[in-house]
Amino acid sequence: MIYLDAAATSPVRREVIEAMWPHLTGDFGNPSSHHEVGESARRALDAARADVARFLGCRPGEVVFTGGGTEADNAAVKGITAASTRGRHVVVSAVEHPAVLESAHHVARTGGALTVLPVDGAGRVDPADLEQALRDETALVSIQHANNEVGTVQPVADLAAVAAARGVPFHTDAVQTAGWLDLDVGALGVQALSLSGHKLGAPKGIGVLYLARRTPFEPLLHGGGQESERRSGTENVAGAVGLAAAVRLLDVDTASVVRRRDAFIERVLAEVPVARLTGHPTERLPGSASFVFPGRSGESILLDLERRGIVCSSGSACAAGSDEPSHVLIAMGLEPEVAQTAVRFSFGPHVTDDQLAEAVDALVASVA
Ligand SMILES: Cc1ncc(COP(=O)(O)O)c(C=O)c1O
């Protein structure tokens, strides 16, 4: 099998499992316990928090461990809006992951207001549109760092500067960019940011919400007051240790992945005449190549590729059994029939030229 679905998930790295193992076995304490077993777990959690803070260029106290990317996104959108003294208006882009989009709709359904910003044909938000959308009662802007379906990278620093000029907190979902793009929160100018362990070589079910000091925040989860009152629940110590180990290990030769991606895209477009690239041609995730095949069935292509040993995806977050076209491709102006022909190839740094060449050959045969 050639696995080209890294944007969906990736395996846990051996070093990460080794780092986690003691915290699932002998060193199993509850960080809130005051005996030595608990204190040891607390020290491990603190060290993990410090590592993630170094990765993001923030203070350890600004790192909140969550149960994954979806929870971090929900907490950012609902939690910051609920605590805002400005009002309950939220601004998001039309191409957000459902974890952000549905959270924003929840705010709107429960007495708030929502503006969904359009994107251009490449999936990018225009900072001028954001400027126009901001109101005195805007509590939060949430725009992703890069899109999970088409790989388009947003001009987050420019967008965050527009929000900052009006004193509005800015959240970015960086679940797809961690490991690929610089996530220094000071350089990005964001007050909140989401990460997910399982896109980085850590397990599923652990994530991070970066929350800048003094950002208004009402927790989603109430209880024992863990994570400095921002996320109650006994901490997933092993998960946090694993996520920290995964970020310490990140060392991707981005330029070489970009070279391989571009060669792959070029060959697909040359050898499969019906293929059209979706997303931005250059401002895209290094390991992401997404296409539509007008007039063909995306699902048949996927099934045929899998029979040939190539595992990839439609890229759309549609629920099982639903054949709704991707909201991302529709927002980018594609016809629903064309959007339904999407196929996404996404890969990590260890993909080889031979594997990518084999994938192109299989695609040529599948689409023929
Ligand atoms: C952009 C983006 N945001 C959020 C999530 C959700 O993260 P998790 O799977 O950790 O809940 C994903 C996962 O696919 C994603 O791609």
Image: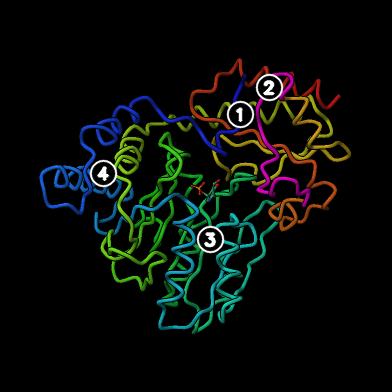
Above or below: residue 288 compared with residue 303? below
Q: Is disc 3 surrounded by few (<14), some (14 to 19) or many (20+) residues within 10 Å? A: many
Q: Position of residue 6 (x, y in %)?
A: 55, 34
N-term mark: 2 or 1: 1
Asked if marks 3 and 2 touch (Cβ < 8 Å), the reply is no
- The residue that label 3 is drawn on is 143
Distance of label 4 from label 3 (alpha carbons): 27 Å
Between the residue at mark 3 and the residue at mark 2, the CA separation in whole angstroms equals 32 Å
Horizontal relation, residue 157 to residue 146: left or right: left
Outermost residue, top direction? 354
Query: Mark 2 and 1 residues: CB-CB less than 8 Å, in contact?
Result: yes
Q: Which mark is residue 359?
A: 2
Q: Earlier in the sequence, mark 1 or mark 4?
A: 1
Q: Nearer the viewer, residue 337 or 153?
A: 337
Q: Is residue 240 visible?
A: yes
State how far apart marks 2 and 1 are (Cα). 9 Å
Q: Which residue is mark 1?
A: 4
Mark 3 or mark 1, earlier in chain: 1
The residue stretch that appears in magenta: 306-324
* SS assignment for the magenta stretch, majority: loop
Q: Name the residue type under label 3.
A: Ile
Under mark 4, the amino acid is Ala
Residue receiving disc 4: 48
Figure check: 353 above or below 82: above
